[in-house]
Image: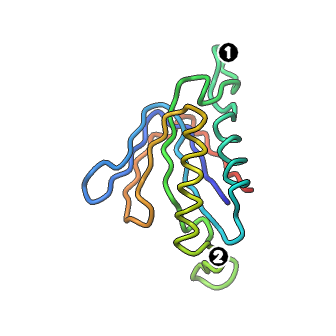
Amino acid sequence: MKAVIQRVTSASVVVEDKIAGQIGSGIMILLGVEKGDTEAAADWLADKICGLRMFSDSDGKMNLSVQDIGGALLVVSQFTLAGNCAKGKRPSFDTAAPADEGKRLYDYFVEAARRTGIQVETGIFQADMQVSIVNDGPVTFILER
């Protein structure tokens, strides 16, 4: 399971000209599910992201988590994170989880994040989405489990 996470002052995802999810200050999460990923990986990743100290304290140091600042998460499925660009000019998606398994683990991750008490908004799995963010910093991390 892979996630690209970005500290944002705002983020939204639009599907068919309608807002599917929107947050203010918090974390934008692009989540990719691969073959062999498990609920344990989703639990670990949700816990890691929700507790990651990536927000600045009063001294300007990254000492606060999204929980600490009362922020929110916007989780968007990102199939292309499983893309392998090592050979040729066209990405291979051989490691991507099949759609039904990808959706199951994506939904599981969202619920794991919600169990922390943080507000969680989402995109729509397999939809054509337009994502807008204001990356704060910019601060971006890549996490894999």
Is 80 rendered above or below residue 118? Answer: below
Quadrant position of residue 82: bottom right
- The residue sitting at 55% across, 57% down in the picture is 106
- Residue 134 on image: x %, y %: 45, 40
| On screen, residue 56 above or below 19 | above
Do labels 1 and 2 touch, CB within 8 Å? no
Q: Mark 2 points at which residue?
A: 85
Residue 49 position, x and y percent, is 65, 41
Circle 1 SS class: loop
Q: What element carries label 2?
A: loop
Q: Quadrant of the N terminus?
A: bottom right
The three-letter amino acid code for the residue at tag 2 is Cys
- At x 53%, y 24%, the residue is 70
Q: Compute the Cα span from label 1 to label 2.
A: 41 Å
Disc 1 target residue: 59
Residue at the left extreme, as displayed: 17
Left or right, 129 with reference to 85? left
| Camera-nearest residue between 134 and 45 | 45
Q: In which quarter of the image is the C terminus?
A: bottom right
Q: Residue at x 70, y 78 (%)?
A: 86
